[in-house]
Amino acid sequence: MPNNADILIVVAHPDDESLWFGEGIHQLVARGKNIIVLCLSGGSNPIRSAEFKKACLRLKVKGKMLNNPDRGMPRLQTSPSDLDLVDWHPEYVITHAPWGNERHHPHHQQCFQISRSWALKGGIPFGYFSEKKPLILNPLIETIEFSVNRPRKNALLSIYDSEISGLRDYEAYHHDKEYLIIERKYFSRISKIFTRLCQTLSSIFESRGPRT
């Protein structure tokens, strides 16, 4: 990942950027990366939105929020087209892990699907933050490790005063490492070709109509 790269980080809820990847964001900014954090929910909640804005200010990144409810719904009312609200073409897109992070949250899984679909469509390199390091060497991905500065991350998470007691229950709150998994370019190309092939086959079967 080159210096001065423009990065779009997509998260499902306010505080996700800080809990799962706060140290990573801090270190990437320190290396000269320009970052926008797009939060897919919580914009209509005055407390949550104020905390998110304060966290982004602390991280020295730009923040944008959508007005979806951030809890009480099985799925976020959003789609890949919502990422078009970022009137800026990033060089990388980063989001939640495909398994939904520590508690397999369905909103996190949905966020991964939406973000990856948008990135593949635009030919943008894609990655996700993880609370755990891959167990096996995988030539299709690059793993970047960030050592957590504990006082700094605690100070960042304390901004979310409305959620702090719940945040402390996550193992990720206490981890001393964060990981960024970047899909290598040829893996993204293979995925894009496979997606197009599936779409083509689906169209062929639909055009044939049901069997009689």
Image (tube, rainbow, N blue to C red):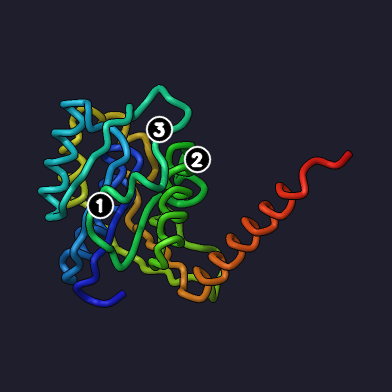
Mark 3: amino acid = Gln
Q: Residue at x 35, y 40 (%)?
A: 12
Residues at discs 3 and 1 in contact (Cβ within 8 Å):
no
Question: Residue 77: which disc?
Answer: 3
Asked which quadrant contains residue 143, the reply is bottom left
Q: Which residue is mark 1?
A: 86
Say few, some or many: other residues with alpha carbon within 10 Å of mark 2 (under 14 / 14 to 19 / 20 or more).
few
Say few, some or many: other residues with alpha carbon within 10 Å of mark 3 (under 14 / 14 to 19 / 20 or more).
few
Residue 129 picture location, percent across and down: 38, 56
Q: Which residue is mark 2?
A: 104
Q: Residue at x 40, y 32 (%)?
A: 77
Distance of label 2 from label 3 (alpha carbons): 19 Å
Which sits in the foreground, 22 or 147? 22
For the C terminus, the quadrant is top right
Asked which quadrant contains residue 54, the reply is top left
Residue 81 picture location, percent across and down: 38, 47
24 left or right of 131 in image:
left
Q: Residue at x 54, y 65 (%)?
A: 192
Tell me the element at label 1: loop
Mark 2: amino acid = His
For the N terminus, the quadrant is bottom left
Residue 3 picture location, percent across and down: 22, 76
